[in-house]
Amino acid sequence: MANTSSIKNGAVILHKNKRMKVIEFLHVKPGKGPAIVRTKMRQIESGKVLDHTFSAGHKIETVRIENRDYQYLYQDGDFYVFMNSKNYEQVNISLSMVEKAEFLQEGMMVNILFHAEEELPLVIDLPMYIVSEITYTEPGIKGDTATNSMKPATIATGAEIRVPLFINI
């Protein structure tokens, strides 16, 4: 068991029997009364954001987590199959755990957050940028560059995105 002095950004704690990731915190010492720690936390399973205030010295339970790089291999029924690039261990992750799955490409490297003691995958982070081919888009109108206009386009994974007018297939 730790106390509120070990709270920092990115830490994962157990709060009301739910795993919460600390987004931001602020240690406040008012003029009178005890110090408090204001936190903004995201519930890992649902993504819900919660504001909570702890009194200084309050006991909290920390969760040991690990970030690991995995490579996406394929979809197998209701699961995505990922492979650890260091030891070639494969892990099946349900379709519902992956946000923005329409951008997932075979061979893509992703970062998976694991609960270290239970070896349970918690969060799958896709890369910030991807390289993909545009399979369909309408041709841009020549000379329409006065505004910051965007047009719809479809990429190789089937996802619909918005691109500048000069982008073609």
Image: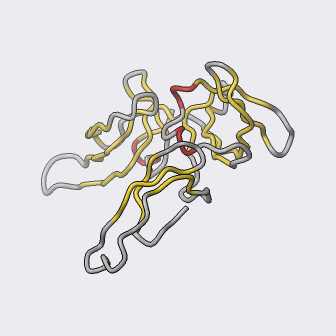
Toward the left, the furthest residue is 32
Image coordinates for residue 96, horizontal then vertical, percent? 51, 26
Displayed quadrant of residue 133:
bottom right
Displayed quadrant of residue 14:
top left
6 sits left or right of 30 in the view: right
Identify the image's colour scheme: rainbow, by chain, secondary structure or one colour: secondary structure
Image coordinates for residue 65, horizontal then vertical, percent? 60, 39
Residue beneath the point at 86% across and 40% down: 87
Image coordinates for residue 90, horizontal then vertical, percent? 78, 31
Displayed quadrant of residue 76:
top right
**Residue closest to the eye, 46 or 107:** 107
Residue beneath the point at 53% across and 40% down: 102
97 sits left or right of 30 in the view: right
**Residue closest to the eye, 13 or 101:** 101
Residue beneath the point at 30% across and 47% down: 37
**Residue closest to the eye, 157 or 50:** 157
Q: Is residue 95 above or below residue 12?
A: above
Residue beneath the point at 55% across and 61% down: 169
Q: Is residue 14 above or below residue 71?
A: above
Q: Is residue 14 above or below residue 32?
A: above
How many numbered badges does the structure rendering display? 0
Image coordinates for residue 40, horizontal then vertical, percent? 31, 45
**Residue closest to the eye, 70 or 81:** 81
129 sits left or right of 42 in the view: right
